[in-house]
Image (spheres, rainbow, N blue to C red):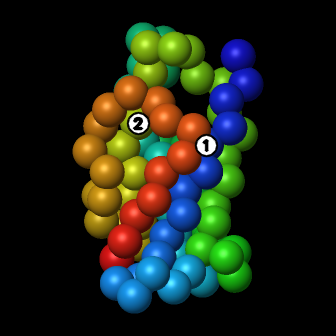
Amino acid sequence: MKRYISVRVVDAGGKPTYYARVVLYVSQTLASGPLPEKYTNSNGLAEFETDLDASARISVSVNGHEQVRSGPIQADYKVTL
């Protein structure tokens, strides 16, 4: 099933962070590991199209640092650096 996941990255002042490297790490029954990395656009947004099952768990890493610990899939994540 196709799932769309968005990660918005902002700085401490709430301004979008451009060109932040975002990686989703997936843990699911049949396959686990990182999805191909994406970089945020000028709005601080990185978007992923995935084929994950409902039981998958995701953690979010930005610029090489885990920002969201493994948990159930959400459609939208917001990370403040």
Mark 2: which amino acid? Ile
Residue position for label 1: 5
Residue in view at x 63 percent, y 61 percent:
46
Q: Nearer the viewer, residue 51 or 12?
A: 12
Establish if 12 lies above or below 44.
below
Looking at the picture, how far across and down is residue 77, in whole percent?
A: 48, 51
Position of 79 with respect to 50 (left or right) is: left
Residue 65 in sight: yes
Residue in view at x 57 percent, y 38 percent:
75
Q: Are marks 1 and 2 in contact (CB under 8 Å)?
A: yes
Establish if 6 lies above or below 22.
above
Mark 1: which amino acid? Ile
Rendered-image quadrant of the C terminus: bottom left
Helix or strand or loop: what does disc 1 sit on? strand
Q: Which mark is residue 58?
A: 2
Residue in view at x 40 percent, y 51 percent:
60
Q: Which mark is residue 17?
A: none
Looking at the picture, how far across and down is residue 25, in whole percent?
A: 42, 42
C-alpha separation, residue under disc 1 versus residue under disc 2: 10 Å
Near mark 2 (Cα within 10 A), the count class, few <14, some 14-19 or many ≥20, is: many
Q: Nearer the viewer, residue 10 or 20?
A: 10
Q: Nearer the viewer, residue 36 or 46?
A: 46
Residue in view at x 54 percent, y 56 percent:
7
The earlier-in-sequence mark between 1 and 2 is 1
Looking at the picture, how far across and down is residue 1, in whole percent?
A: 70, 16
Q: Quadrant of residue 33?
A: top left
Establish if 15 lies above or below 29.
below
Residue 26 in sight: no
Q: Quadrant of residue 32?
A: top left
